[in-house]
Image (spheres, rainbow, N blue to C red):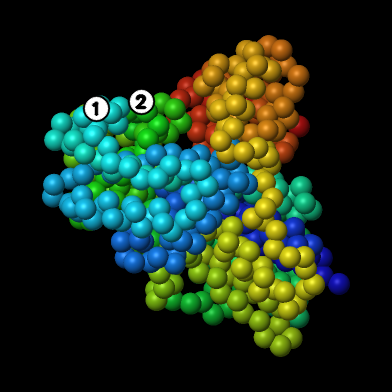
Amino acid sequence: MADYDLAIIGGGLNGVSLARDAVGRGLRVILLEQGDLGGAASSATPRLIHGDLSVLERRGFRRVHRALAERRTWLRIAPHLVRPMRFVIPAHSEERPPWLLRAGLFVYDSLTSRGGLPVAATLDITHHPVGNALKRPFGTAFEYSDCVVDDSRLVVLTALDAAERGAVIRTGARCVRADRTDTWRLAVVDRGHRRTITARALANATGGWTSMVAETVLRQPRPTMVAMQMSQIVVPRLFEHDHVYVFQNSDGRLIFASSFAHDFTLIGTVTHDFTGDPAIVAMAGADVSYLCDAASRYFRERVAPTDVVRAVSGVNLTLASAGRRDGTTLFHARRRKAPLITMFGGDVTTSRLRAERAVTRLTPFYPMSPRWTAGAALPGGDFAWDRFDLEVELACDRWRFLEETQARRLVAAYGSRLSAVLGEAKTREELGPAFGPELTGAEVRYLMACEWARFPEDILWRRSKLGLTMSAADRDALAAFMASVT
């Protein structure tokens, strides 16, 4: 008998979504990730849960409708991670005419039952806060509803839900060989120790490494793939409100600018073909300049490359012959050969649905429970999306030493499970050593014990974004503290 029903290689969003879905249907699941969860492309997404206006413009009505249905699902199951926002498109005389934007947003609204989100509207931004940061020629804008998401925390909490339902999640574990007969036999180097694992089915969800793993580890034929690099920049905060700007660039692309980690603005995304090693992807200077110029076309305050405090890039794959939005799932099963799922590409919005459909392909091989993930909240998400501010108020009432901005960050990260981090603490000192104004020893211990954090980078850039503001001295203190935790 095999050790597991399904082994998954890759701890990005596709991999952890497969693990969550499969274990909830009764399968024995193990997930192997050679680094940290969400350590590559899953932490370099545009951070949007949306139908995507650019797809609508290409008349992909069914795809937009499907994505907007998933938007409703995410609001229901992850209200702490997925936040509804108003998106604003300033009208530009050299770009799409106002009537086209207005008509497009009408269709966008009609493709979903909004579930309480406001419909599109026309704004006079000369008398609206969103106009304060923009150049004077922009007097009219179009406003609509969509959502933003904390992409890297979505990966971790999906893995946490899978683990709590019985999946084995192993970070720092690299699959170096996989032999296929009627079962899969995997050779794994797990934090320096070599071990063998057997599984009745295997999923390759290694993102930018999918092709390499197929060829060198699985020794299976690989489809013709195109590697795509996604890049964004982070600059000091350019505006004080929570609206998300959608800028029409001169080449027809749509560029987003949103508030990020309270004191910063995220601008993106630029996408193009990539060649090289996904482990050392870096944003080119030309891409930085492109995003700065696109933002400067609209913002009153010019955005220069010297303003960039962090550049974020990741690599994913797409089939050369396929569209790039919904990703690709390949299923290979032959007589007397264990099944193989290959999943790559796709965006955050449809990740849950991709996993659900992929696991369903295994139904002829295993008895399993019905589909379930659309109705089950992620850890900490057992409250209504429009009660987020109330959750923040309750946190401030219970832990009176928290400032509102601190409570907001913590609720956005842990939701209703915040007590697992802060416990019954009455003062900040009871939470242990402080690493800057935000991070405490209690939170670090929780992340190490429950969320697979092993190194400071795991906490500062993926479990949070506190790396943007933490001093070098506090980073050193954090590293020393983590090394001392057993």
In this view of the protein, which residue sits in the foreground, 292 or 175?
Answer: 292
**Picture residue at 74% right of the left edge, 86% below the top:** 336
Give the image location of residue 33, x and y in percent.
63, 54
Give the image location of residue 407, x and y in percent.
58, 23
* Marks 2,1: beta carbons within 8 A: no
Q: Residues within 10 Å of mark 1 (few under 14, many from 20)?
A: few
Q: What whole-number distance in Å separates the C-alpha atoms at marks 2 and 1?
A: 15 Å
Q: Residues within 10 Å of mark 2 (few under 14, many from 20)?
A: some
Answer above or below: position of 87 versus 53. above
Quarter-of-image position of residue 331: bottom right
Q: Is residue 287 left or right of residue 340?
A: left
What amino acid type is highlighted by mark number 1?
Answer: His
Answer above or below: position of 300 versus 200. above
Give the image location of residue 260, x and y in percent.
42, 34
Q: Is residue 458 visible?
A: no
**Picture residue at 79% right of the left edge, 62% below the top:** 26
In this view of the protein, which residue sits in the foreground, 189 or 199?
Answer: 199
The earlier-in-sequence mark between 2 and 1 is 1
In this view of the protein, which residue sits in the foreground, 211 or 142?
Answer: 142
Residue designated by label 1: 127
What amino acid type is highlighted by mark number 2?
Answer: Glu
Residue farthest along the bottom direction in this orientation: 335
Answer above or below: position of 420 versus 257. above
Tag of residue 240:
2
